[in-house]
Image (tube, rainbow, N blue to C red):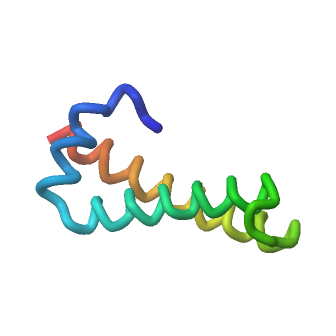
Amino acid sequence: MFPEFRELITQLKTSDHHFLHLFDKHNELDQQIKNMESHVVHGTHEEIETLKKEKLHLKDQLYTILRKASAA
């Protein structure tokens, strides 16, 4: 996710607790979605779609933080 911001992501994960929380939540959702799609964990199509939307919202928030931090 966002390879162009790899160094900034590493920096923000140690200095910005809000960013770290969003980043970790995004990764948790990603794993949960993968588990549901591979039938490791039960999940309906609607549940998976809801999680994907939440994950995308988190990604948008992360991107906004990264853009602001890179412009500073």
| Residue 41 placement, left or right of 70 | right
When the figure is inspected, residue 10 is found, relative to residue 31, above or below; the finding is above
In the picture provided, is 2 more to the left or to the right than 38?
A: left
- Residue at 22% x, 32% y is 7
| Residue 22 image point, x, y percent | 38, 64
Relative image position of residue 5 (x, y in whole percent)? 32, 33
**Residue in the image at 73% along x and 70% along y:** 50
- Residue most toward the top? 4
Q: Quadrant of residue 70?
A: top left
1 shown above or below 18:
above
Q: Quadrant of the C terminus?
A: top left
The residue furthest right is: 45
Asked whether, in this view, residue 51 is left or right of residue 5, the answer is right
Residue 67: image location, x then y, percent: 32, 42
**Residue drawn at the location 22% of the way across and 41% of the way down:** 10
Nearest the eye: 7 or 66 = 7
- Tell which of 33 and 6 is nearer to you: 33
Relative side of 33 to 37, left or right: left
Counting labels gives 0
Q: Quadrant of residue 41?
A: bottom right
Relative to 1, does residue 22 appear above or below in the rendering?
Answer: below
